[in-house]
Amino acid sequence: MTSSAVSDFEIQKQAQQQQNNILAILKSGNATVVNEKLQRCKDFKDGKDITIPFCYKENSPKEELVLEHVQQFQKQFQLHYDERRNLFLYPKNECDLYKFICTTIRPQKIGYLELYNYEQCARYMSFFIAYEQLDPPDQFPKVIPSPTNVARWQKGDCFDLSILLCSVLIGVGYDAYCVYGTAPRSITSKNESDLDYIFINNGIKEDDEDQNKDNDELKDNEFAILPKEEIISKYDTKIQKQKEEYEKEQRRIALTIDDDEPDQMGHDFYAGRRIHCWILLKAGKRGVERNLFIEPSTGRIYPINDSPFLTVDAVFNNRNFWINMKLESKVADLNFDEMDTSMNWEYVMLDTLVEQAQQDDEDYNYGEDHNQQQKHVDPQQQQLQDIVQILDMPPPWPPKVFIDKECFLKGTPLGESTVFYKKCKIDSFAPYSQEQDGLVQRFTIYQDYKRLKIQEIRYFYKHRSDKLVLKRRFPYEFKTIEEYEPGNKPQRKTITTIDRQLRIIIYYPTRNHDGLIKRIEKIGEKTIEEYENRDDRVIYRSVRFDPKDKKFEQRDLTHNDRYMGQVKITKMTQKYELSELYPASEQPQKVVIDLQKNLIKVYYHMNKGEINPQFKELKRENMHSLGKLTEPGVEKKNEDALVSQENQRIANLEKECLTHIKNQEDEVKKDEEQLRSQDLKLEKTLHDKARERYKETLKKSEEEKQREQADKDYLYPYLEKRKLQGKDVLSYNEALEIQKDVMTKLKERLLSRAAIIQKKLEEERAKLDQAEQMQQKKSDPDDNEYINIQFRIDILEQRAIRFESQALIKYEEMDRKLKEDKRLSELKKK
């Protein structure tokens, strides 16, 4: 047996032994699974995250009094009603301290507009907090942390998420409550794969009704004579229809998945026993018209009479705790408006009863017997009021809930999320997380339940420099739709492209320089442009060309198409709107230039009451010949002159139409090149710009402080260089290095200054030697120049002597100053 075979055998033996050990541990029951929530609470209790506030460790006297009352209430309830029913009144917090669950709700406003509407708030919180299922699902959680920590951790179960959401909703003015009971597995596990996505229609707009109309036809009117219907054989129609249905069925069979049906969930061992907590939103405040349920894990809203929840065990908020006395009742049959008065509900605190009694007293009609009524006070009511003065609801114990701006903008703990719905997948991304294209959300819509065949993909963008906000792609149709927001340079609104066959561009009305609002490009066939608010009253212009005919003659009109290159124009059409300043019959409604038939057709607007429009059909040769005279005569000459003028005007229309078509094609091509050439950037929000300005201001202020500190502290540059600023006393080695740096720097500065003086002195001496030589050569020497040079030399020599003596003094003073500095006191000890 070879060594490699032995090693393989040993590896297999070790793997088998390890597997047997794992199975033995599982069978013995000693395997432990760490609960993430309990681990987070343990880390918080140990002080690993932050310093623990006092409210987490101890209860106030009022909290202790209420907690004692709640414990007695639960004992009495179990004694008189149901001893096996756990009311979950006082769970433990992160530090294993019992807290009345109503005091865990902390109503508070959080400064984000997205959290002021209950629908947006519920939807946002369902993504912001990572949902965790109860473990086990038929038992209450062992710990109820504060909503402050839940918002900071961004993780929690249904109770944690409900308490946080209820706190925010009450803080912004809603009448919100937490409800716990039982729910099906699809709710407790946050399984939305069989549910429709409620925002699936985002990005869909109604199609333009006139999109498929033929723009070459005249507008219909009530007097138009309809053409006769074409005679078609019924037998041929039947055969053709059967053939099309057969082909359609064959295509459907080829593309259909046989097992296309929703996945069935297996048997639920905890069916009917899964504990869950959700939100009740009562009508009356903030425009809520009826009572609603909010599922916090998904943000879905359900009416009371049509909700998926099975039973309701109890309801609570920051004011009281209500117990449902009829667990067998359906959720739709419960009346949540009578929780304070109905016998079907039992409340824990007395605040609600006293408030109701006070309202009844306010509504009482005081009359002449008011004094007698005051004498006969109900002793039971008086006793309740005395108790409430002592036993009222304590204030919420958790600290203020805080959500960081960066975390809020992410929207999810990781900045991105993927959720599966019925025939749909939603990918969400935080703004600016996708730096390449600014993608924030992607909808993938499928045709089957298995999510194999894609029907449509929608991309949602934000903060792009080209203003693209939505892109819809249909893979099997080879179709793409792009939507832009106002502000892009070409003023484009939507661009629809179908398999390089059709391209439709719709512009915003703010494109004022040419009035173009729509451009349809039937690639290789035709180009259509629609206008509005033009001075020349043109509302429509089209050009048709033949890309197959590449034989050009001198008289042919050509067009440089962006896709097909140089092509021959076969037809041009131009339409005009009616002006009220001139008679309708004198204004052309449409001009058709047919280059194949060599004809020009002119249609005029109709006056009121006319049935058929005026129509002229002219030959292009006559339009361009300018009307040659064949017979003499003044009247004929005048007539020919008018005809020639009309021909010239129509010929100018043809030239104008061709010029505008070419100019518009060049402009569209220029816009396309400009969009391709510019780099895509993500524009910053106002918050980011303000934050950057704030950072720049802080940076400038810090630099100014550093300069001021450097002016005051002679050691600051050296301490900053070695990152020792802030220390009161330096070690011996650090002090020695600072002393060496300071003395070296001082020595270099003194030597450089001495070198400057010496250099100037040498220059003046050289000038003196040169002046002496010049005086010897001259017969009449100039003594003034010699005297000035000698004077400067004497001054420089005196300055050099004085600087030398002062340099020694400065050096000694700096050495003494360093030794006396408290930060360098270690130098004296050694």
Image: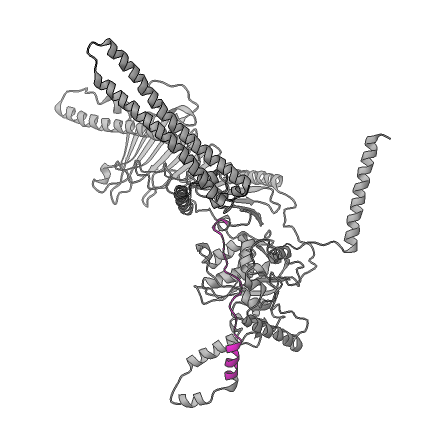
In the rendered image, the residue lying farthest to the right is 1
Which picture quadrant has residue 158? bottom right
Query: From where the camera sits, is residue 715 visible?
Result: no
Q: Residue at x 46, y 43 (%)?
A: 820
Residue 358 position in % (x across, y down): 46, 79
Residue 118 position in % (x across, y down): 48, 59
Residue 781 position in % (x across, y down): 21, 13
Which picture quadrant has residue 578? top left
For the residue pair 98 and 314, the one nearer the viewer reads as 98
Residue 437 position in % (x across, y down): 48, 38
Q: Quick check: 79 left or right of 10?
A: left
Let me know if residue 393 is in the magenta part.
yes
Q: How many marks?
A: 0
For the residue pair 473 and 722, the one nearer the viewer reads as 722
Q: Where is the C terminus found, in terms of image quarters?
A: top right
Let me know if residue 489 is in the magenta part.
no
Q: Residue at x 40, y 89 (%)?
A: 371
For the residue pair 216 and 716, the one nearer the viewer reads as 716
